Image (cartoon, rainbow, N blue to C red):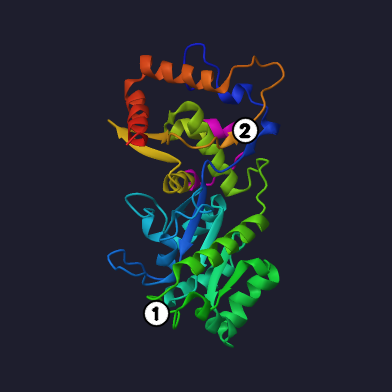
Amino acid sequence: MIAGGNIVDLVDRIDLGTIHVKAPSSLIFLCGGKTDVTQPKPVSLREAFTRIYTAPDLRPYHTIMPEDFRIFPPHGQYKDILSFETEFAEIVDLVILFSESNGSFTELGAFAMIKEIAERLLVVIDDESYNADSFIRLGPVLFLQNNIGQSSICVVNRSDINIRSIRDVSDLNLGVFENRIVTAINTRKSEVKEPSTFDPERPGHVIKLVVGLIQHYSALTFPEIETLVGPFQVNLKPGKLDDYLLCAINAEWIKKDRRGFVDYYCAVPNKGNAIEYKLKKAASVEPRDRWRAQISEYWKAHDDARFSVIQAALKGAGR
């Protein structure tokens, strides 16, 4: 039993065959050229994308860039960023890659070959690069079109968006650029199908399950999470739970907060529910919000350190 008193654990009531998982918030993983927010004009198309966040169709998304990640020691134990990006891609709506720099060309070659990323990948490439008989065009771009679909490659015409070349976008027509990119995102998103019925073999599903468990209890320790995922037939290899928690932290669905010698993983407020489920027929029905409130009341009365973590998260969300 995680919470004491008369509070029944979620795993004792839930019908395990009815679990559906979903992302608590919509995410875009944004890759491409360099960014420099100190400049009055965008230095890359990727940076230009950050200037159209207020477009109505983009407001539901939270955009995360590789520079935002904190995955290496002391924050996490990943040994390379590609391993992290492969698992992180399973919880995002889209991976958008602006093919415009040497680094992004390398990313394109790698991403096209990784199924978990390619299934959500939207590549934005200029017409000059697209029409050239280069390795990029004849390799990863053609591979994605043939194996993922035409909507995985969006070609932007330089004349349409008023740029001389992909390496000089200072005179970009931001309005036309926004129209082209938003249309491409909406089309690509409509073709990305993510099953919601819980599958313990899918890392993205396990990450969402873990987030849902943390949401239910408001804050959990690592051993408690290990105990709770057991009944869900999740086969966790050594170190994988740490990795999955790090994915959820970087998605800003949970926070890690230490009190004394104990690390707590706390749900970030104002997010959607990561899991949906039905209760066993014999289980008494308790409204979800009331059930969670009872757990919070128990922490307040019996675990002041954990309750402090929960309160800190609530205060942080209100700022």
What is the x, y in percent for residue 312? 32, 31
What is the x, y in percent for residue 134? 56, 86
**Which residue is rendered at x = 40% and y = 61% of the image?**
51
Q: Quadrant of residue 181?
A: bottom right
User: Would residue 270 appear left or right of 261 to someone viewing this image?
Assistant: right
Q: How many other residues sit within 10 Å of disc 1, few (<14), some (14-19) or many (≥20)?
A: few
What is the x, y in percent for residue 132? 57, 87
**Which residue is rendered at x = 33% and y = 53% of the image?**
73
Q: How far apart are marks 1 and 2 (CA)?
A: 47 Å
Q: Which of marks 1 and 2 is nearer the N terminus?
A: 1
**Which residue is rendered at x = 60% and y = 70% of the image?**
153
Quarter occupied by the C terminus: top left
What is the x, y in percent for residue 239? 47, 47
Seen in the picture, residue 179 relative to 284 is either above or below; the reply is below
Give me the disc on residue 78: none
Q: Can you name the residue that lies furthest to the bottom here? A: 133
> Where does the magenta region start and end?
228-241
User: Would residue 180 appear left or right of 67 to someone viewing this image?
Assistant: right
Seen in the picture, residue 139 relative to 199 is either above or below; the reply is below
Residue nearest the observer in this picture, 48 or 269: 48
Give me the disc on residue 168: 1
Q: The residue under label 1 is which amino acid type?
A: Asp
Q: The residue under label 2 is which amino acid type?
A: Glu
Q: How many marks?
A: 2
Residue nearest the observer in this picture, 284 or 130: 130
Q: Can you name the residue that lies furthest to the top here? A: 6
Seen in the picture, residue 315 relative to 13 is either above or below; the reply is below
